[in-house]
Image (spheres, rainbow, N blue to C red):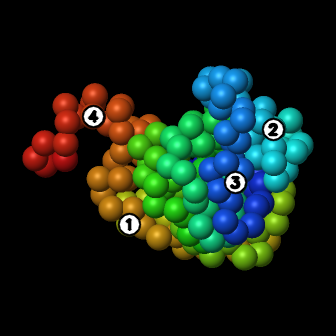
Amino acid sequence: MTLTGRARVFGDDVNTDYIITSARKRQTIDARQLSRYLFESIAPDFGASVHPGDVVVAGRNFGCGSAMEIAVTVMQAAGIRAVIAHSFARSFYRNAINNGLLVVECDTAGINEGDRLAISLTDDQISVRDVTRAVVRTGAPFPPIMRRILEHGGLVPFLAANGGFGSGV
């Protein structure tokens, strides 16, 4: 699996309410409608400037706060296919995997807004190549089951294709 996209850079401690505010979720839970409000409290123009294939890049503790699955699905509705961060809140990380959003833990220092990135996921390695700066970073690998869930586009499609977790999965 290889993804390419433009880096959209944030800092540390981006919580789920920064991703999509609670006030917006009171209006609707339709992820497509909410995607125009993505990150509005910390980057007011983000929703209007996001392009399909963009990659969110952040520092430590991305997705902290409440364990809202909609924070992941709104990013996906906006066309974001991956998030690269130094570290993730565990609930966000699992929500991302379960919904088929690629999350990569690696050093993000030196990745700048607008850099072109190429993310490659193989059986035993994840690499993030900053094409703009000619720098390659290695991400934390996924256990085989998580990689298979991602390859199927999330947990529900994985379970549908495999009839559950069963032996040998």
Residue 29 image point, x, y percent: 61, 26
Q: Secondary structure at mark 4?
A: helix
Q: Amino acid at mark 4?
A: Leu
The residue at the far right in this view is 45
Q: Is residue 138 visible?
A: yes
Q: Which mark is residue 78?
A: none
Residue under circle 4?
A: 159
The residue at the far left in this view is 167
Give the Cα separation between the discs numbered 2 and 3.
Answer: 13 Å
Residue under circle 1?
A: 124
Label 3 crowd bin: few (<14), some (14–19), many (20+), radius 10 Å: many
145 or 88: nearer the viewer: 88
Residue under circle 3?
A: 56
Give the Cα separation between the discs numbered 2 and 1.
Answer: 34 Å
Give the Cα separation between the discs numbered 2 and 4.
Answer: 32 Å
Label 1 crowd bin: few (<14), some (14–19), many (20+), radius 10 Å: few
Q: Is residue 118 visible?
A: no
Q: Which mark is residue 47?
A: 2
Mark 1 or mark 3, whichever is nearer to me: 3
